Image (spheres, rainbow, N blue to C red):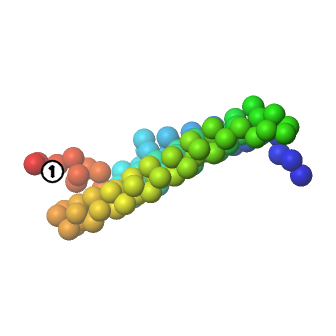
Amino acid sequence: MNVPSEHLFFLSSALFALGVLGFLVRRNVIVTLMSIELMLNAANLAFLAGSRLHSAPGRPDLQGPLFVIFVITVAAVEAAVGLALIIALYRLKQSVETDSASEMKG
């Protein structure tokens, strides 16, 4: 069964919109990071769907999968740094709300 690329683009845009909504509405830092991860995965799906749409039948286009590998690498680094910041915030403020992070002074 072959899913049309238009359906993949629609799913990608819906996931990205859900990630933006979660990023803008929620006040929890963990949910905010999860929303960023959802937006990155939606971009990955769009890269793969576009790559599949523009590839020739005998020659697959490898630009989309290469971008996906790069985005996954960036997402892994973002998750590691984000979780370290969350642990530091929790140790300092005993909360992971974004309001308590905005009160920090360096």
56 with respect to 49 (left or right): right
Q: Is residue 90 visible?
A: yes
Residue closer to the observer: 26 or 49? 49
Q: Is residue 86 visible?
A: no
Amino acid bearing label 1 = Met
69 with respect to 95 (left or right): right
Task: Name which residue lies at 64% across and 40% down.
Answer: 64
Task: Name which residue lies at 22% across and 54% down.
Answer: 100
Q: Secondary structure at mark 1?
A: loop
16 with respect to 101 (left or right): right
Relative vertical location of residue 87 with respect to residue 98 in this rendering, above or below:
below
Residue closer to the observer: 23 or 44? 44
Residue 44 picture location, percent across and down: 60, 45
Figure quadrant of residue 91 = bottom left
Task: Name which residue lies at 37% across and 60% down.
Answer: 80
Residue 32 picture location, percent across and down: 41, 51
Residue beneath disc 1: 104
90 with respect to 73 (left or right): left
Residue 56 picture location, percent across and down: 81, 34
Task: Name which residue lies at 34% across and 56% down.
Answer: 82
Residues packed near mark 1 inside 10 Å, few (<14), some (14 to 19) or many (20 plus): few
Residue closer to the observer: 42 or 32? 42
